[in-house]
Image: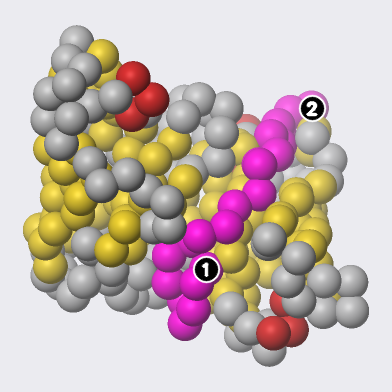
Amino acid sequence: QVQLQESGPGLVKPSETLSLTCTVSGFSISSGYYWGWIRQPPGKGLEWIGSIYHTGTTYYNPSLKSRVTISVDTSKNQFSLNLSSVTAADTAVFYCARDLGSGSYYAYWGQGTLVTVSS
Amino acid sequence: EIVMTQSPATLSVSPGERATLSCRASQSVSSNLAWYQQKPGQAPRLLIYDASTRATGLPARFSGSGSGTEFTLTISSLQSEDFAVYYCQQYNNWPHTFGQGTRLDIK
């Protein structure tokens, strides 16, 4: 059973970098699939942030591309999100997820973690 | 970037009745479309993929249809547990994009 768990600070100051890690269990990241980050501001809809393949190939939302980096650490079976120069508009629940092949729909999701940007 | 537009924003339906939710893409996404259900405080749950394939264990009252730019999610006889927010997502092109959601309320 594939399980994903987000972790990281729940509070980040404006202009700083938001860093989250997704720890995967029940499946080896190096075996394949795309691993993604999706966020949801309070009371709003889902926004796709980006995805990474186990080889390191990445795709990003153009609206966030200049501030986002997604990386993978196969030795720890984790992948990570860095979002720089954050503002209050970046406050959201962040989800990590795994697709079912070739950059597709997300079948497995973490429970989500709320990150608040505030001084 | 492909823009996904869902309608209506809110749909009020009585239990036992049929609900029809729509999703339109700004350009063709072939059949590369998924539907998710999200309840308060929970992560989204995959319902339908490839426009019409039900996810494992999904009740048969859920069905998806469409291709190209027009898609529909139908719930044939609403149960109390079906009242939630529903999102469509295209995965035909990067960046993958979600619709803004349809809230399904109890009438």
Q: Is residue B74 above or below residue A118?
A: below
Amino acid type of the residue tagged 2 in the rendering = Ser
Please report the residue visible at 33 percent of the width from the left and 20 percent of the height from the top: B80
Give B15 or B44, whichever is nearer the viewer: B15
The image position of residue A81, as x and y in percent, is: 71, 60
Q: CA distance from mark 1 to mark 2?
A: 35 Å
Q: Are marks 1 and 2 on the same chain?
A: yes
Disc 1 is placed on an element classified as strand
Q: Is residue B98 at least partly visible in the picture?
A: no
Which residue position holds label 2? A119
Q: What x and y, as percent, mark residue B38?
A: 44, 36
For residue A82, side relative to residue B102 (left or right): right
Point out the image quarter for the N terminus of chain B: bottom left
**Picture quadrant where residue B43 is located:** top right
The magenta stretch spans residue A101: yes
Q: Is residue A56 magenta?
A: no
The amino acid sitting under disc 1 is Asp
Q: Which quarter of the image is occupied by the C terminus of chain B?
A: top left
Which class describes the residues within 10 Å of circle 2: few (<14), some (14-19), or many (20+)? few
| Residue located at (31% from left, 75% from top) | B92
- State the residue in front, A39 or B62: B62
Q: Relative to residue A112, is residue A73 depicted above or below?
A: below
Q: Is residue B36 left or right of residue A87?
A: left
Above or below, A94 against A10 in this view is below
Q: Chain of mark 1?
A: A
Q: Secondary structure at mark 2?
A: loop
Q: Which residue is mark 1?
A: A99
- Number of numbered discs present? 2
Point out the stretch of residues depicted in magenta.
A99-119
Identity of the residue drawn at 69% across and 34% down: A114
Q: Are marks 1 and 2 in contact (CB under 8 Å)?
A: no
Which of the chains bears the disc numbered 2? A
